[in-house]
Image (spheres, grey):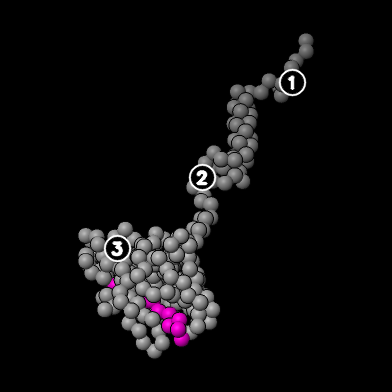
Amino acid sequence: MTHASPSAHPSPAGHRALLVAGGLVALSLLTGCGGADGTTSGRPQPGTAAPPAQAPRQPGAGTSAADPAASGPPSDASASTSPEAAPGTRCHTWELRASVGRNNPGAGQRNFPVVLTNTSSRVCTLYGHPGAAFLDAAGEQLGPDPRRVPDSPVTVRLAPGESAWAGLSYASPEISGARTAAPAALLVTPPDERDPLTVRWTGEEVPVSGGESEISVTVFQPGTGA
């Protein structure tokens, strides 16, 4: 009679041991193929944001003085909100009315106050330089963007109905000899905003090219500049 080898038929205890060992091997293979959250190893995880796209530059945009562009050559860049102004208090374009005061000539200069008035029912703030651009009757810009005069800005708090002003200046054309043109309007963009306000220009011709044709703007300060 042929007797089977004891190893051909494992005991119940040995059989259970083999099952446990096999399960451990299978589990290790599964964890090697996937992350703990069920995603395949090496794939981007949900919630990983792509680098933010840079906002397009706009002509004549206002900037706060905290923007590096404010201390360099004239730029179309719009600045980020100044840390001086609390979040949510900045004056937005649709809350403001723009106007231009009378010329205050002096030392061969033409000096106009560019005034923004708070027409909303809340308190808001202005900080920095306005954007400005002269337009002809066809809506085309005349001359380059004004140069922003380096200065130490302050946060101007505007209650409803209150105003702030920034100075717009250029050399008298009859003295500078610059080529001039007659603007139909002046675009004024509040600091950190992209939408401009349009003011009808009723003044004289302004320099657009040639010697001493530069136009400059200052930071906002309280009042109307009158």
Q: Residue furthest right?
A: 2
| Viewer-closest of 121 and 50 | 121
Left or right of residue 40, residue 122 in this image = left
Q: Which mark is residue 46?
A: 2
Q: Is residue 77 visible?
A: no
Name the main secondary structure of what is drawn in magenta. strand
Height in image: 139 above or below 216? Answer: above
Question: Residue 147, how many percent across, how many down?
Answer: 46, 76
- Residue visible at 54% across and 42% down in the picture: 36
Tell me the CA gap for discs 1 and 3. Answer: 99 Å
Total number of numbered labels? 3
The residue labelled by disc 3 is 96
Among the two numbered marks 2 and 3 on one chain, the one whose residue lies closer to the N terminus: 2
The amino acid beneath tag 1 is Ser
The amino acid beneath tag 2 is Pro
- Residue visible at 31% across and 66% down in the picture: 98
Among the two numbered marks 1 and 3 on one chain, the one whose residue lies closer to the N terminus: 1
- Magenta-highlighted residues: 164-175
Indicate the secondary structure of the residue bearing disc 1: loop
Task: Place residue 121 in its image quadrant.
Answer: bottom left
- Residue visible at 35% across and 77% down in the picture: 112
Question: Residue 91, how many percent across, how many down?
Answer: 31, 63
Q: Are marks 1 and 3 in contact (CB under 8 Å)?
A: no
Tell me the CA gap for discs 1 and 2. Answer: 57 Å
Q: Which mark is residue 5?
A: 1
Q: Is residue 116 visible?
A: yes
Height in image: 93 above or below 171? Answer: above
Tell me the CA gap for discs 2 and 3. Answer: 42 Å
The amino acid beneath tag 3 is Leu
**Mark 1 or mark 3: which is in front?**
3
